[in-house]
Structures are given as structure tokens and as C-alpha cells.
């Protein structure tokens, strides 16, 4: 009986560890997706900012 309880405890521990690792993997995959998204859109945001600044400067220049 004691051996059976130990085996069940060990199986429960392994099951909990497996769930923990699966959750951690999902978290890392979500982080990877976020980083890929940011890596793609960061240059787009920079270019948009440069274009906006250029348009503002041109507007000020041609106003006077």
C-alpha cells in the first residue's frame, strides 16, 4: 500500500511538472510571437515618424 501511494505521489508530481513546462512553453511561444511582431513593425514606425517629421518641416519651410 505504501509503495502504491509513493508511486501515485511521484506520478502526480511528474504530471504537475509536465503542466508547468507546457505552460512555460506556451508563455515563451507567445513572447516569441510578440518579439517577431515588434521586430517587423519597429522599422515601419520609425519610417512613419521620419516621414511625418519631414512633412512637418516642409510645411514650415513652405509657409514662410
Image: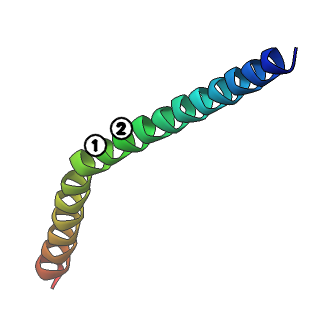
Q: State which quarter of the image contains the C terminus.
A: bottom left
Residue 47 % position (x, y): 16, 59
Residue 14 % position (x, y): 63, 27
Please tell me the numbered disc located at residue 33.
2
In the image, taking residue 51 as reference, residue 14 lies left or right, namely right
Please tell me the numbered disc located at residue 21.
none
Q: Pointers 2 and 1 in contact (CB under 8 A)?
A: yes
Find the residue positioned furthest to the bottom: 64
Q: Would you identify the image quadrant in which residue 51 lies?
A: bottom left
In the image, taking residue 8 as reference, residue 60 lies left or right, namely left
Residue 16 % position (x, y): 67, 29
Q: Would you identify the image quadrant in which residue 2 lies?
A: top right
Mark 1 crowdedness (10 Å alpha carbons): few <14, some 14-19, many ≥20: few
Front residue of this view, candidates 2 and 29: 2
Secondary structure beneath label 1: helix
Against 11, residue 21 (above or below) is below
In the image, taking residue 17 as reference, residue 30 lies left or right, namely left
Q: Which residue is mark 1?
A: 36
Front residue of this view, candidates 4 and 63: 4
Amino acid at each position: 500500500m505504501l509503495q502504491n501511494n509513493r508511486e501515485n505521489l511521484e506520478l502526480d508530481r511528474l504530471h504537475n511538472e509536465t503542466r508547468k513546462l507546457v505552460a512555460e512553453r506556451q508563455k515563451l511561444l507567445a513572447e516569441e510571437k510578440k518579439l517577431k511582431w515588434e521586430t517587423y513593425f519597429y522599422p515601419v514606425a520609425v519610417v512613419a515618424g521620419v516621414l511625418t517629421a519631414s512633412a512637418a518641416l516642409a510645411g514650415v519651410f513652405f509657409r514662410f
